[in-house]
Amino acid sequence: MALMTLAQARENFFAAMDTLRSSKVRSALTVLGIVIGVSSVISMAAIIQGLNKFVQDKVESLGSRTYFLTRFPPAMDPSRMPERIRTRRYIEYSYADYIRQAAPDVQIVTTIGTRGFFFGDSNLITSGDHSVEKVIVRGAEPEYTEAIPLFAVERGRFISTYDEEHARPVVVLGAAISESLFPDRDALGKTVRINGGLYEVIGVFEHDQGLFLGPGVDIFAIIPLSNFRKEYPGSRELVMAFAVPKNANIEVAQGEVIQAMRRLRHVPAEKENDFELSSPDFLSNLWNQLTGALVILTTVISSIGLLVGGIGVMNIMLISVTERTQEIGVRKAIGARRADIRLQFLLEAVVLTLVGGTIGILIGAGVSTLVRTLVPSIPATLSYLWVAIGFAISAAVGVFFGYYPASMAANLDPIDCLRYE
């Protein structure tokens, strides 16, 4: 019985394929909606998966156990904040020494000063006839690259303890700045002017463009924090970074830092913190909010495509039932059961949507390959899971929209079918 059922299913499948081949243009127009729906789902899933990997790598490169102390919440416009937040006191240079003493479970505590366009500052770096304007000048201590591994020196060295203690005029340049100022020669050992002051180039960072998450390492010029403090006393928006070693409890270490900050800033016990403690996860959270909107948009587009495709499938199947009424009557007259007729037309609908789904999956795979080729930093990949989901969606649309025409064909009276002209 099982073999017979399998044979019947195979026969019905080939009958469905013959029907689709006989109406190529109509079938092609019908599957177009399915192609659009499935390809948009597959493409966006591959791109978002690649972007998620990119964001996760960025978070790791910022230091998986590195945390930041700031005056304002990260990635927020201060002008839109409540007054109680906007009027918070600045982070001070002296805080780091106190926290090092008060937080024994913290490994690194370092202060960062920044002068950038997002604070309303302008910077100019020149060398001979070459100049770069859109740069971020940052003051940092020797521990900076340990706390934030994203800033990896490719050539030369980073700021040393001696540089910091003597406020030496030395700088480590982002790769893009180095290439702009010294297109035909190595920047190491050369002298540049930063906002009018002379600095010796002691290192060049590895390339990092930053992409959508903000400015990358390429546009940073880092000088000793002591020199930054001397040259830019008006740049008071400091950030502190601290790292928790792997053998220490993160909650305990964070608690020590928070309590030290509250004592430093004389925050009463009943008041909330007047500073922010954040981890690189805020980038992941920000990205998740962005992808949430992308997922909703993709769902709407794909749903419209699948709905249009599904209605097209139902329409073509209803036309097919009408055109083949006599065929249905003949099949029933020679012993075909209702289940056989229903299965035949259901198979036709499912084959139609699976063809569209397959084309959609191939287009999605092509889009993900194109993105990966044009933007290598985004490893857009088409996973087997999403291929399976694409086929499942296609089959489900075929079953859902094909069931009514199939049932209609199965319930036709064989005598009326044979009389139909």
Image: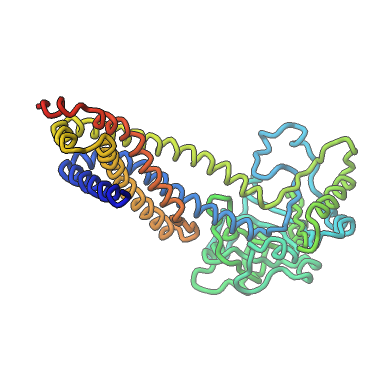
Q: Quadrant of the C terminus?
A: top left
Residue at 58% in and 62% down: 126
User: Seen in the image, is 308 located left or right of residue 272?
Assistant: left
Q: Answer whether residue 234 is visible to the viewer in this image.
A: no
33 and 180: which one is in front? 33
Residue 307 coordinates in the image, percent (x, y): 36, 33
User: Seen in the image, is 58 located left or right of residue 325?
Assistant: right
User: Seen in the image, is 220 located left or right of residue 421?
Assistant: right
17 vs 421: above or below: below
Residue 172 coordinates in the image, percent (x, y): 65, 66
Residue 386 coordinates in the image, percent (x, y): 44, 50
Q: Using the rendered view, name the quadrant where residue 162 is placed.
A: bottom right
Residue at 52% in and 52% down: 51
196 vs 302: above or below: below
The single residue placed furthest to the front in the displayed view is 1
Q: Answer whether residue 175 is visible to the viewer in this image.
A: yes
300 vs 202: above or below: above
Residue at 29% in and 50% down: 6
Residue at 17% in and 29% down: 414
Q: How many marks?
A: 0
Colour theme: rainbow
Q: Using the rendered view, name the quadrant where residue 181 is placed.
A: bottom right
Residue 182 coordinates in the image, percent (x, y): 53, 69
290 and 201: which one is in front? 290
